[in-house]
Amino acid sequence: MWVATDVETGVASQDETREVALENLDDALALHQNEGDAIDSPEAEPEVLRDLDIDPDEVEQAREETDELPAFMQ
């Protein structure tokens, strides 16, 4: 596993390859700096999640199974 960290902001990401970990870090930094996709409505959420390689169905299932999700996912 590779972990990529931006020392200045403390933002980190990871993946099985160095290249993808760095790509993920770029995406995370863009979101951290409010340059990424925002979820402005419930209808926009699935597309934004897919863009982040997150399965919207898994998020929905997790919501149904627990109320312990981070606030941004509730």
Image (cartoon, rainbow, N blue to C red):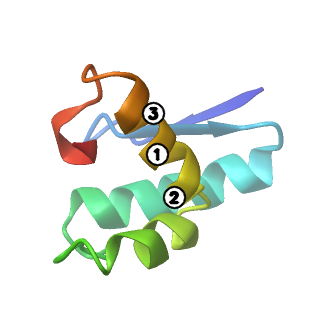
Query: Which residue has dot 2 on it?
Result: 56
Q: Position of residue 69 (x, y in %)?
A: 29, 28
**Residue closer to the observer: 36 or 21:** 36
- Going from N to C along the chain, the mark reached first, 2 or 3, is 2
- The residue that mark 3 highlights is 62
What's the residue at 46%, 45% (across, down)?
59
Q: Residue furthest right?
A: 17
In the rendered view, would you say 53 is above or below 73?
below
Q: Identify the residue at image location x=35%, y=40%.
A: 11
- Asked which secondary structure carries label 1, the reply is helix
> Which residue matches tag 1?
59
Please provide percent x and percent y for residue 39. 24, 71
Contact between marks 1 and 2 (CB within 8 A): the answer is yes
Query: Dot 2: what SS?
Result: helix
Number of residue marks: 3
Quarter where residue 23 is shown? bottom right
* C-alpha separation, residue under disc 1 versus residue under disc 3: 5 Å
Tell me how far mark 1 sits from mark 2, CA to CA. 5 Å
> Is the residue under label 3 in contact with that under label 1 (CB below 8 Å)?
yes
Camera-side residue: 18 or 14?
Answer: 14
Residue type at mark 3 is Ala
**Relative to 62, is 18 on the left or the right?**
right
Left or right of 56? Residue 32 is left
What's under tag 2, amino acid-wise? Pro
| Residue in view at x 81 percent, y 37 percent | 16
The 10 Å Cα crowd at callout 2, few under 14, some 14 to 19, many 20 or more, is some
Q: Residue 73 in the image: x percent, y percent?
A: 28, 45
Q: In the drawing, does residue 61 fall left or right of residue 74? A: right
